[in-house]
Amino acid sequence: MGLTNNLTEQKMIEEEERIHSDIVQRAFLEHYTNMSRKHMTIMEWISNGYCKNVPFLVKVDDDTFVDIFHLITYLESKQTLLNGTFYCSATSNVKVKRPNSFKNFKWQITVNEYPENLFPTYCEGFGYVMDMKLAPYIYWCSMFRRSIWIDDVYVTGILAQTLGIRRIPFQNGHGYSNLKSAKEDNLFTNSIFLVSFYNEFFPLTVQDLWREAVAHSMEID
């Protein structure tokens, strides 16, 4: 994560790190337009030898619930298939949105920042799995490719395309299932990444999802 100008928040971050050793913080401001820098911080951190024996990296947005039991079982069974790849909701032929045409659109980007009219195939950012061995290549490739602030496009699109990395699409049900409907319809036997839409992501809902994921974990093949 980046830095905060709030001293109280910074003290809380440092206390969290002191107790749990679960935060990597770098010298740039915590801001949405610095997401690619945050992404590269993790790639650099891995490239420096941390988590050497971990086969996969899983990137997840904070509005996404992950059934880790199903995920681990799936990855263990598909480790060879997913070697050297991203496993994700891959999307292609996405037209670039410009500020003059989409003034209030969250993902707009200027011609100076990215001159092409289409983005390369990339992984939707709610969650993806990456072979850990790719991290050093992605990190060093970033030294030679101009960054854009839309991190999913930059990392899993531009850099992955430059390196010739495959993006394997999620199996049906593994990604982008509606969190609320999945809970109501008991879809945990097939879902891995459950995404919150709008204002339905409440703590009690997450707790219910976790209990159901644990209950279904013994049924996963």
Image: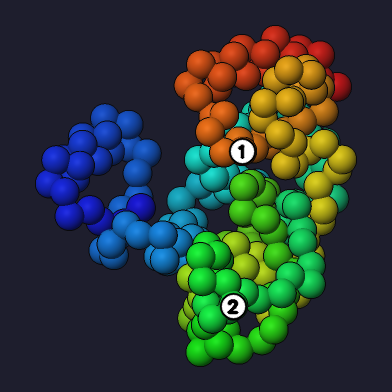
The residue wearing badge 1 is 197
| Labelled pair 2, 1 in contact (Cβ < 8 Å) | no
Q: Is 204 rendered above or below residue 62?
A: above
The residue wearing badge 2 is 101
Q: Nearer the viewer, residue 200 or 87?
A: 200
The x and y percentages for residue 47 are: 49, 62
- In the picture provided, is 161 more to the left or to the right than 18? right
Residue type at the position of mark 1: Phe
Q: Element under label 2?
A: loop
Circle 2 crowding by C-alpha within 10 Å: few under 14, some 14–19, many from 20: few
Q: Is 110 rendered above or below residue 70?
A: below
Q: Element under label 1?
A: loop
Between discs 2 and 1, the one toward the N terminus: 2
The x and y percentages for residue 73 are: 76, 29
- In the picture provided, is 56 more to the left or to the right than 34? right
**Residue drawn at x 67%, y 70% as measured from the top left:** 157
Residue type at the position of mark 2: Ser
Image quarter hosting the C terminus: top right
